[in-house]
Amino acid sequence: MDDFRYVDGRLFCEDVAVEEIAREAGTPVYIYSKKTLERHFKVFDEAFSGMPHIVCFAMKANSNQSVVGTFAKLGGGADVVSGGELFRAMRAGVPAEKIVYAGVGKTVAEIEYALNSGILMFNIESEDELLTIDETAGRLGVKARVALRINPDVDAQTHPYISTGLKKNKFGIAIEHAMEGYRTASALSNIEVVGIHQHIGSQLTELGPFVDSLKKTVELVARLKDAGVDIKYIDVGGGLGIKYLDEDPPHPSELADALMPVLEGVGCTLIFEPGRVLVGNAGCLVTKVLYRKATEVKNFVIVDAGMNDLVRPTLYQAYHAVKPVMKKEGPEYVADVVGPICETGDFLAKDRTMTVPEGGDLLAVMSAGAYGFTMSSNYNSRPRAAEVMVSGGKFQVVRKRETYEDLVKGEALADFS
Ligand SMILES: *Cc1c(COP(=O)(O)O)cnc(C)c1O
């Protein structure tokens, strides 16, 4: 559910006309509804109220300070995958003791930063990394709390690029080597084993893979207990899908109902790392029509947002609904909505039936709150878009549009020749 709706043919975000935001902030612009963010967080949090848990928002989905800060105010933690995300999380008010840190390539500098910050735990992705963290913690004279990320070899039935829990994926430690990994970890003097972690993929629309992998994890927790390794935290990961077109993903309460029986009596604190499900439908990307163009076989609507602003269609062949910011009467046709970037893969939508737009019309690319701005780039030297947050009848620019000067910030003309 979201807070974008039409009033007399005009698209509103909460109580603000999207057109008004575009006029003030310019285009392309990302718009987020605070009300939706809050509702999504609360729905997720309350679904698991029956057991001790922490909701650690997966920052890579949307790391804007105002978005992360909104969740922090509601008691949320953060799942970070880099030193930069750790910095952003703490700056937005997330307490370090609610931050978990995953990722296959943590550098020594990042590990030091996280240890000095006192994060809840590292989610370890390999034995090499474990040894590096042990060594780094020893050097700093601290203990590193860790969970091992287990790769349960479960097919998440999602796009191959966002499937992470299969043997052939680079993530985690194969489940059959987990006991060994825990034995190694427990023997290291600067490591404190506190948890177990799994995350099998993104945009999951079935409960089966969640249940299957959690069952494997819980079995492992029992075996670890027998072996004298006490697990305090089970980190279930993220991955719950959202509706982009006609998907019918489970509601967080259905996920909770499916997972509860598996967790009966384990006595651990649960950690969840939802990303997309909290932010995806809370945001849209508003873009302006520049030109129309027709070839012998295709109609194109050329807009001022491109794959550098929203790469999901290009990268995952993802579907995003495209809606007019102002509905109007007129003839319809089928067209591709494409950006100004010099790449054939630069499209936001393909073969959409729409009222033939005119230059200057505004279009809203829906469900763009997750993996939208965070994946944007400066490709083709395009300044990145502005971000706006709406709350009730108010809105505020929460990230300024970049300028040309921003594009060359830190760059130099080499003075040797
Ligand atoms: C990406 C990621 C998530 C969030 O995934 P969503 O599908 O957005 O919920 C959670 N945990 C880890 C480790 C991730 O890499």
Image (spheres, rainbow, N blue to C red):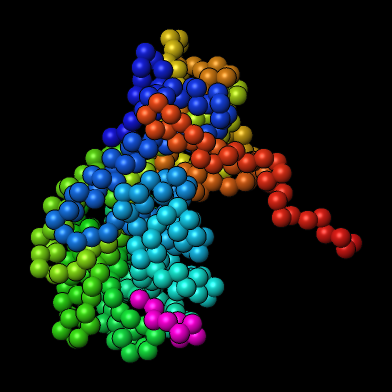
Would residue 54 be seen by someone viewing this image from the given angle?
yes
Q: Give the side of residue 275 with respect to residue 232, left or right.
A: right
Q: How many marks?
A: 0
State the residue at coordinates (70%, 51%). 409
Task: Name the image quarter holding the N terminus.
Answer: top left
Residue 101 sits in which quadrant? bottom left
Q: Give the side of residue 197 with respect to residue 395, left or right.
A: left
Q: Nearer the viewer, residue 117 or 225?
A: 117
Q: Which residues are magenta?
A: 137-145
Up/down of 280 relative to 169, above or below: above
| Position in image of residue 257 (x %, y %) | 13, 52
Does 154 lie within the magenta span?
no
Q: Give the side of residue 192 with respect to residue 263, left or right.
A: right
Would residue 334 be seen by someone viewing this image from the given angle?
no
Q: Give the side of residue 286 with respect to residue 359, left or right.
A: left
Up/down of 34 relative to 19, above or below: below
State the residue at coordinates (44%, 48%). 62
Does 140 lie within the magenta span?
yes
| Position in image of residue 212 (x %, y %) | 19, 62
Residue 242 sits in which quadrant? top left
Q: Nearer the viewer, residue 32 or 74?
A: 74
State the residue at coordinates (39%, 33%). 391
Task: Name the image quarter holding the C terminus.
Answer: bottom right
| Position in image of residue 129 (x %, y %) | 44, 78
| Position in image of residue 328 (x %, y %) | 44, 12
